[in-house]
Amino acid sequence: MIKIGVFGAGHLGKVHLKVAEASKILDLVGYYDPNPEIVKKITSEENYVAFSSLEELISAVDIVDIVTPTLSHFEIAQKAINANKNIFIEKPMSNTVKEANDLVKMAEKKSVLGQVGHVERFNPAFQAALPWINSPMFIETHRLAEFNPRGTDVSVVLDLMIHDIDIVLSLVKSKIKKIDASGVSVISETPDICNARIEFVNGCVANFTASRISLKKMRKSRFFQKNAYIALNFLAREVEIVKIKDVNPDINEDLPLFFTNAEGHKKQIYFENPNIENTNPIKDELEHFANCIIRNLTPKVSLKDGAKAMQVAHQIISKID
């Protein structure tokens, strides 16, 4: 089993602790949190081992699982890498693009693996839709959340939109040509709602909307490509695939959802409903990382991927500023 230590026992950290404890390939050694009140509360509720220092827990594990506030990511990751430990680091991977790029270089120099917690890559709806998404040319994403003070230490771009930025960058194999963005700070000191438009060199356009001051939650993306439309609901874990195929012009019988396009070609619309497994994305991403360590594979969401998403997110923020 791969030994793992969780750094940060807040809301998400507790989820990581629970998942690691239940895993068959992860061995939860313990956790570290600098807040004595959090440690006291967890000790009274669970049997997790609390470590008294960062360094002590780092030395005892194979995976340093960083689930602390963003401002402390770089410091902990740097200490872990210098100790030759593999790092799993929640998104956004650092506070600045320079820090992200420095972590990539440090990990490469020390030959340790790193993965960034862009958990939507492991969402079962996205996994089910992935085989159907092929060279999308227009993408629209909406990620809306009710206001929660947790996470307002960073812009909504880094808090929410970065999930969709990472998804799009993983699908569009082209350089970015242009970025436009606008945003408004309503409750926080940083933007709470933002819209961004990215144009890629290959002609693809992606339109992003993120808000943390909405009345209801929404995590939806739509992908438009040649002869297909894929609608993905990350929250409800639903996928709708609409495809268009050519019809033999010699067939005269009526077909359901049949039409003739402007060029006179017969087309038929049909639907696909891929099977969506009931999985735990956080469990999947942590166990995927453990398997990458065992087999010496590159993680699905590498440190380079995380740094790339960070760079684009900060470009969007600069357009707002």
Image: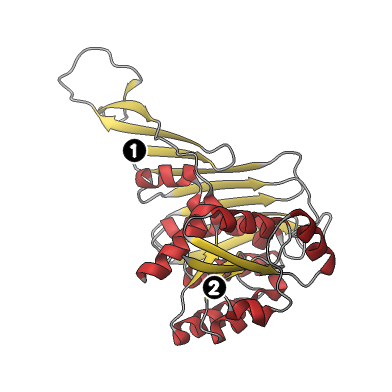
Mark 2 and mark 1 residues within 8 Å of each other at the beta carbon:
no
Question: In the displayed structure, would residue 35 be above or below residue 128?
Answer: below
Q: Find disc 1 in the rendering and name its residue.
A: 227
The picture places residue 279, in percent across and down from the top left corner, at 50, 44
Query: Residue extending furthest top?
Result: 253
Q: Quadrant of residue 156?
A: bottom right
The picture places residue 115, in percent across and down from the top left corner, at 50, 68
Residue at 49 percent of width and 84 percent of height: 105
Residue type marked 1: Asn
Residue at 48 percent of width and 55 percent of height: 24
In the image: residue 218, left or right of residue 63: right
Residue type marked 2: Ile
Q: How busy is the neighbourhood of tag 2: few (under 14 within 10 Å), some, or many (20 plus)? A: many
The picture places residue 33, in percent across and down from the top left corner, at 74, 70
Circle nearer the N terminus (2, 1): 2
Query: Does residue 298 appear in this view?
Result: no
Q: Nearer the viewer, residue 85 or 154?
A: 85
In the image: residue 289, left or right of residue 310: left
